[in-house]
Amino acid sequence: LTIYENLTVAVAWDKNRVTYPTAWEEFLFWLKSYSLWVICAIAFIIGLIYNYVAWRRFGRDPKPGTIIPLFYPPEGMSPAECIQLKNNGKAAKTQFAATLVHLATKGWLRIEVEKEKRQTRVIREKKEVPKKELNEIEQQFFDRLLKSGSITIKKKKYNSKLRTTYDKMVLQIQKKQKGVFYILNNRLKGRQNIFPLATLGVGYLLFFLLGGSYYIVIGTFVLQLFVNMIFSSLYEQPTKEGRALLDKIDGFIMYMKYANKE
């Protein structure tokens, strides 16, 4: 045959010479062809069901009580403690400034803003100035920050004392509140990671034995991690005591919004 010439061979045989696969054999063949899809889908569904059931049984927050306007925050709680409890035990950027202003209103320090120098001076008040009582967290914050009597805060300039004072205050609040006012449910968070790891292991084995696209396994793994992140935040919950305090904080916020918004 020269170029562009073709040859066709036709072969025929009588019917029933070929044994057709049974429905079960066709199903097994389909299963092998799409094994990665099947296993990853099953792993994702099982992980999703586990997260949902675990959240329903152990992670649901106590129902809030009746929220009514309150003129004062919960007794003995500083602004920083209220902020952190409201933020599910996590630190917030507003805690430092809130504590600083709160100590000023209690008469322990004064804040002098020097706009031209783009800095703020925080100065310990004299002993004879009348002061309101501080709780333990506020007292330690004050002692760390103003041990030398004053401190200058310059805009956009790192200050190690500010950082240390803030970090230690946050850690102290965590020790006071964790397990008492809120629960992180870390045991549930640990168990939920079993499913993404199992998906990687089984997926790699099937990819090695039967072939396919390993991107299916990676995609499912990432999707499982995303679902776990969502449920991890849902697992965190206040205790009954914490929920009662949150009701009081919400009542105080309600009062401030309507009476002292400005």
Image (cartoon, helix red, strand yellow):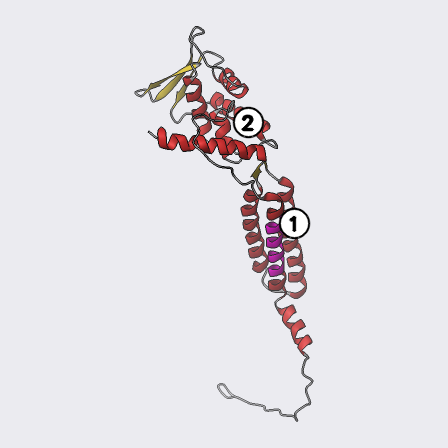
Does the magenta segment cover residue 41?
yes
Q: Position of residue 95 (x, y in %)?
A: 46, 27
**In terms of secondary structure, what is the magenta stretch mainly?**
helix
Crowd class of label 1 (few under 14; some 14 to 19; many from 20; radius 10 Å): few
Determine the residue located farthest toward the left in the rendered image.
116
Left or right: residue 127 versus residue 46 is left
Is residue 182 visible in the rendered image? The answer is no
Question: Which residue does the numbered mark 1 point to in the structure image?
Answer: 194
Q: Residue 110 at x, y = what percent? A: 39, 15
What residue is at 50 percent from the left and 20 percent from the top?
138
Label 1 sits on a secondary structure element that is: helix
Closer to viewer: mark 2 or mark 1:
2
Q: Which residue is mark 2?
A: 173
In-image side of 14 versus 80 (left or right): right
Query: Where is the C terminus found, in terms of image quarters?
Result: top left
Q: Mark 2 or 1 closer to N-term?
A: 2
> Range of the magenta residues?
40-54
Q: Nearer the viewer, residue 105 or 240?
A: 240
Whether 33 is drawn above or below 56: the answer is below
Quadrant of the drawing holding the N terminus: bottom right
Q: What residue is drawn where x is 62% and y is 63%?
A: 36
Task: Identify which amino acid the numbered label 1 is placed on.
Answer: Ile
What x and y, as percent, mark residue 114?
33, 18
- Bin the neighbour count of mark 2 within 10 Å (Cα to Cα): few under 14, some 14-19, many 20 and up: some
Query: Is residue 93 within the magenta segment?
Result: no
- Rounded to the nearest angstrom, the CA distance separating label 2 from label 1 is 32 Å
For mark 2, give the secondary structure.
Answer: helix
The residue nearer to you, when weighing 71 against 230, is: 71
